[in-house]
Image (cartoon, rainbow, N blue to C red):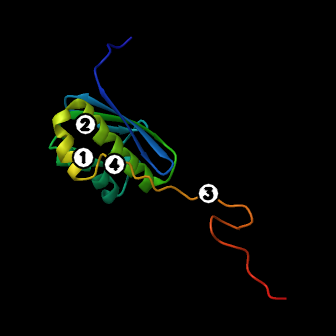
Amino acid sequence: MTEQQQYYYGTGKRKTSVAQVRLYPGGGGFTVNEKTLEEFFPLPAWRSTITEPLRVTESQNRYGVVVKIHGGGVVSQASALRHGIARALLRADDALRPVLKQRGLLTRDSRIKESKKYGLKRARRAPQYTKR
């Protein structure tokens, strides 16, 4: 068995994506679903979104990040991961709250798909009106 290592945990959510984030103290890589960050999120814009909480708090090389993520699309997963990292950083150091809160990184984006209503084709799309 391997020795238990201390970590800080945070859950991030966006639409239907859920990211379970663990921050391990000390330098380390970035593992997402047992792949590297570059493999899982090939576009630099996605990686920039994800690493924003670490950049803002100037703690890029202080933590190793291990993530399990599921649900949603790639952009939604990137936003969920950003939210999860921000929450985990808050558990690691409560003094980071003002910086993270000012950038809006602790706020969960609550926008989700509106549910379909009966008698309609989609959430608000009504069947086409016919006069005769």
Q: Residues within 10 Å of mark 2 (few under 14, many from 20)?
A: many
Inter-mark Cα distance, 3 to 2: 34 Å
What residue would you read off at disc 2? 89
Q: Nearer the viewer, residue 50 or 93?
A: 93
Which disc number belongs to residue 107? Answer: 4
Q: Secondary structure at mark 3?
A: loop
Image point 38% across, 48% down: which residue? 108
Where is mark 3, residue-wise?
A: 115
Name the amino acid, label 1.
Pro
Query: In the rendered image of this protein, does residue 116 appear above or below residue 91?
Result: below
SS label for mark 1 = helix
Instruction: Tell me where residue 67 sits by quadrant.
Output: top left
Question: For this view, does 56 lie left or right of residue 126?
Answer: left
Q: Give above or below for 112 relative to 64.
A: below
Q: Is residue 121 left or right of residue 19?
A: right
In the rendered view, tell whether residue 113 sits above or below residue 132: above
Mark 1 lies on residue: 53
User: Toward which corner of the image does residue 29 lie, by quadrant?
Assistant: top left
Q: Are marks 4 and 3 in contact (CB under 8 Å)?
A: no
Give the mark nearest the N terminus, 1 or 2.
1
Task: Please say if the residues under marks 1 and 2 sit with CB atoms less than 8 Å apart.
Answer: yes
Instruction: Compare marks 3 and 2 and give the one earlier in the sequence.
Output: 2
Can you say whether 38 is above or below 87 in the image? below
Is residue 44 visible in the rendered image? The answer is yes
Mark in front: 4 vs 2: 4
Callout 2 secondary element: helix
Q: What's the CA distance linking mark 4 and mark 1?
A: 12 Å
